[in-house]
Amino acid sequence: MSSPKGAKAAASKSPVSKSPASKSPASKAKAAPRAAAKPAPAAKKAAARKAPSRAKAGDGDPTPAQKAAFLKALAGGVKPNSAALRKLEEKKGGAFAPSPPAPQRKVEVLRRIPAPAPRLETPETKDALRIAALIESGLARGELDKVQPHAQQALAAALCRLYAANHEMGERYPILTAQGAPVTATDVMVMCGALLKAVDLQVFELGMWQSWSSG
Amino acid sequence: MAEQFVGKASEFKDGERQIIRIGEDEIGVFRHAGAFYAYSNFCLHQGGPACEGLTIARVIEPLREDKTSMGLHFHESDMNFVCPWHGYEYDMKTGEHVADRRIKLRKYDVVQKGDEVYVLA
Ligand code: FES
């Protein structure tokens, strides 16, 4: 064991002593064993020279027969649950191992949203569609007087009441669809104006009613 | 990604939807025209329940040769779903916003094995 003084002298010679940390008393004390161990490299070298011969004789390495079996297994394909597979797993760190079952995450059904109600083709629906098609075909041919005004009035009144009754019951659907021949903005204004006039309503009354209700 | 069992295809009617939770993810699973689609239920606008609003056919406006409009029509096969909060409309087949295709809901793959439906999540 060298004295702290001697340690300091030895430390100042070694490359370690150049670091600022080595200036502290603690590091000085630590530097002493390092300095003392300096002659060790020779012994280390000797040990290193011996080491490979020890490694050759190690127990963990496969024997030539095991190696041959391993290569044979590789060439022949790896059978599940075989010793070769286990060996492969060992060698490759499990890279060929069947992936472990994924952790089961719970699927929670929060809501089921049913499909929109299917369109029912009732006999009345079929009749109404037939009448609509008749009117459309007459229009297309320019035959505007085939459906006489009293029939139009009956149709308009019935449709108006049917739509309003459904609306009241919460059955909200668009009165016009984009299918078939387009209804123009002018058509709508003419018809709405006529309907308002028929029940003696002004446009501002319609506006007031709409602002007060959800209609 | 693991297959998560969602339900039986035979119990999942066409046009029906299921909102499911897998871990932290809330997912809308749709069945439309026989096929299954699954998207994140978080709207890209402000996080509304994107998959729980109306399903509505894509609105198209065909033009005549002189470029005048033939009116608005519903597309016969393209279906969209609409976020109920402010109306972001997403394509059922891709999850893309119909007006800006760069905006896209997270899509989950759906696998059908026999009668069983799985979502990869
Ligand atoms: S949050 Fe979906 S549209 Fe605004």
Image (cartoon, rainbow, N blue to C red):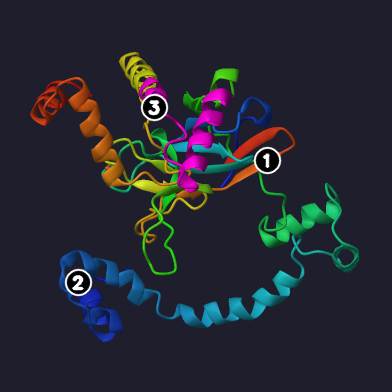
Residue B31, visible in the rendered structure: yes
Asked if residue A179 is positioned above or below residue A29 in the image, the reply reads above
The Cα atoms of the two marked residues, 3 and 2, are separated by 104 Å
| In this picture, residue A11 sits left or right of residue B64 | left
> What residue span does the magenta drawing correspond to?
A126-155
Of residue A48 and residue A67, the one placed in the foreground of this image is A67
On screen, A40 above or below A153? below
Name the amino acid, label 3: Gln
Q: Which residue is mark 3?
A: A152
Secondary element at tag 3: helix
Quadrant position of residue A65:
bottom right
Q: Please check the rendered image and state whether residue A16 is part of the magenta-colored stretch, yes or no.
A: no
Q: Name the element at disc 2.
A: helix
Q: Which mark is residue A21?
A: 2
What chain is tagged by disc 3?
A: A
Amino acid at the residue labelled 2: Ala
Residue at (55, 27) in percent of width and height = A119
Name the mark on residue A105: none
Question: Are labels 3 and 2 assigned to the same chain?
Answer: yes
The answer to whether mark 1 and mark 2 are in CB contact below 8 A is no
Q: Are marks 1 and 3 on the same chain?
A: no
Q: Residue at x 39, y 27 (%)?
A: A152
- The reply to whether label 1 and label 2 mark residues of one chain is no
Report the image quarter containing ligand 1.
Answer: top left
